[in-house]
Image (cartoon, rainbow, N blue to C red):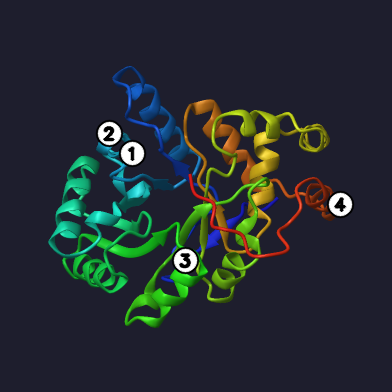
Amino acid sequence: MTTRQIRFPDGSTLPAIGQGTWFMGEAVSEKAREIKALQAGLDLGLRLIDTAEMYADGGAESVVGAALRGRRDAAFLVSKVYPHNAGGAKAIEACERSLKRLQTDVLDLYLLHWRGGIRLEETITAMEALQQAGKIRQWGVSNLDVADMNELWSLSGGERCMTNQVLYHVASRGIEFDLLPWCQARAVPVMAYCPLAQAGTLRRNLFSHPVITRMAEKYQATSAQIMLAWVLRQPGVMAIPKASSVAHVEENAHALTLELDSGDIAALDAAFPAPTSKQPLAVV
């Protein structure tokens, strides 16, 4: 069975499942476990690690930095900048703070976390300045809808955006109506955050949903692996579930080779219908 890959516009090719770090770095008592989970993911080939200056006020970046000590080259490192820092000197300073916490000289990919009050032109200029300074290799965005992406593409340098990171899972399919086709048509990879749904009632309901549990039994897999395989069925989409423990990372990695057949995809479509009209971009 083949391991699914994702290709970025600059030619970088990575396994289509990465490691998310939202909620990491919030408790000192959890740091060793979080570091171990990230390192286990690297050992399993899950090279992309996604973090942000927002997560635990930089705490998640510090955890990632500790996990990458002595093995920075094994990772494709992604971080995100607050909207209010996404222009001018603030962007340079924010990036430098992230680099310090991450204990590295360069980010592989730096994303605008969501759109704020700073003009996209200013963000592009800041990203290009960071590239020229050797502090980031590429840049992209997160939580931008079709209108935002069209505006970005209309600006000088905007088409060099490497990715759009958005919420996407079996019970949140709004991007399939317009944003996902827009990105696919331009070969802009989509990074699906919360591909297993955010913790809480929805997640519990999905994990125990009869259609999903029936497929898990059929494929000798877990509900999480079924949901990840469903996300990865889309061309140009990768998933970044949280790397919360070694066991979860191992479970995530095994989903890279799981392919659902057309009948099972149809069953999930019936249980969780695709959108038939424009939906507001879901954000958590």
Cα distance in 3D space between marks 2 and 4: 43 Å
Mark 3 residue element? loop
Image spot of residue 130 (x, y percent): 20, 65
Q: What secondary structure is marked by label 1?
A: helix
* Earlier-in-chain disc, 3 versus 4: 3
Whether residue 52 sits left or right of residue 162 in the image: it is left
Badge 1: how crowded within 10 Å, few (<14), some, or many (20+)?
some
Quote the CA–CA distance across marks 2 and 3.
28 Å
**Above-or-below relation of 58 to 192:** above
Residue placed under numbered mark 1 in the picture: 55
Badge nearest the viewer, 1 or 4: 1
Point out the tag, 1 or 4, that comes first from the N-terminus.
1
In which image quadrant can residue 67 be found?
A: top left
Whether pointer 2 and pointer 1 mark residues with C-beta atoms closer than 8 Å, the reply is yes
Viewer-proximal residue among 261 and 268: 268
Q: Earlier in the sequence, mark 1 or mark 3?
A: 3
Q: Residue at x 55, y 54 (%)?
A: 238
Q: Name the residue carrying label 2.
A: 59
Q: Tag 4: Cα neighbours inside 10 Å, few (<14), some, or many (≥20)?
A: few
Q: Which residue is mark 4?
A: 263
